[in-house]
Amino acid sequence: MQKLVILSGAGISQESGISTFRDANGLWENHDIMEVASIQGWHNNPELVLDFYNQRRRQLVEVIPNKAHTIIAQLEDQYEVTVITQNVDDLHERSGSSRVIHLHGELYKACSEGNKNLVLDWKEDIKLGDLAEDGSQLRPFIVWFGEDVPLLDLAADMVYDADILIVIGTSLQVYPAANLIHFAHNAKRKYIIDPHCQDYTVPSDFVKLAMKATEGMAKVRDELVG
Ligand code: OAD
């Protein structure tokens, strides 16, 4: 089977009703990114950070995967698919994708403030005073600005081995994730699907599809599956 790698960002979940970060009315228009999504922000005001991620977690219950997620899951019938996502939602998993690498963490997990390897499944709000088994405060299992991206090397290996790469719904502004598109040395087909992709700088062998995720994935599926 050919290896198909998806690199997804917030835009793929937009049609499910989850706000992106940097679009008009995106999350970073109404929240200070360094206050709620950095390790310093956590040290300065953990309650504010918990509240931000508790809201995101609560919203997840109200949304469902869209057609773009579903098409990606269905491509497993013809391809060995690996999804590398910057998203912290679980919509890829819920639509049936079996191999998902969450570069920036997962909303439905919590970890110990003292040891990020101590990870728990967690669907409720996290409150100050909720402790991990090592006695440390629980925190969202999110890779914040100022922290390492532990799954980066694994993701880079996957992209390097890909026969086909589809980049979807990401502004490619956050590093090191954005760098992954340059590792696809062996891919014979590369696509970027994003309404604004004409403005983005990507290597010249990418096919740019300036479309919403659902529409773009349907088009690529028709090309790949026939
Ligand atoms: P951004 O908000 O930066 O970019 C979202 C992208 O989705 C933009 O390029 C939009 O044009 C596109 N978009 C909007 N609606 C779309 C739709 N219906 N279909 C397809 N594309 C659409 O989100 P990311 O690139 O994912 O990290 O952001 C990367 C990281 O920045 C996030 O993981 C998060 C954030 O800070 C952390 O918080 C650590």
Image: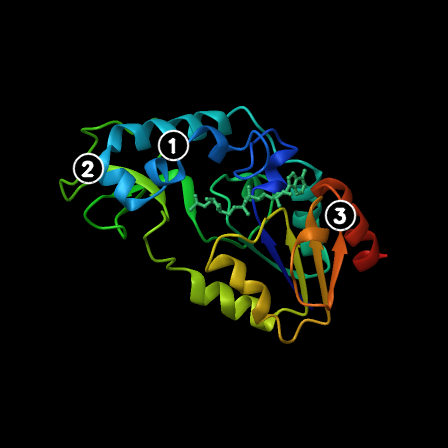
Locate the C terminus by quadrant.
bottom right
Residue to which mark 2 is pinned: 137
Q: Amino acid at mark 1?
A: Tyr
Disc nearer the start of the sequence (1/2) = 1
Cα–Cα gap, marks 1 and 2: 15 Å
The answer to whether 197 is drawn above or below residue 12 in the figure is below
| Quarter of the figure with the N terminus | bottom right
Can residue 115 be seen by looking at this rendering?
yes
Mark 3 lies on a secondary structure that is loop
Q: Which residue is mark 3?
A: 210
Residue 16, labelled with which disc?
none
Q: Which residue is drawn at the image coordinates 56% and 51% (left, top)?
A: 98
Report the mark closest to the observer, 3 or 2: 3
Q: Is mark 1 within 8 Å of ligand 1?
A: no
Residue occupying the point 44% across, 67% down: 153
Viewer-side residue, 211 vs 65: 211
Which is in the foreground here, disc 3 or disc 1?
Answer: 3
Q: Amino acid at mark 3?
A: Ala
Task: Please tell me how many numbered marks the rendered image carries.
Answer: 3
- Whether label 3 lies within 8 Å of ligand 1 gets the answer no
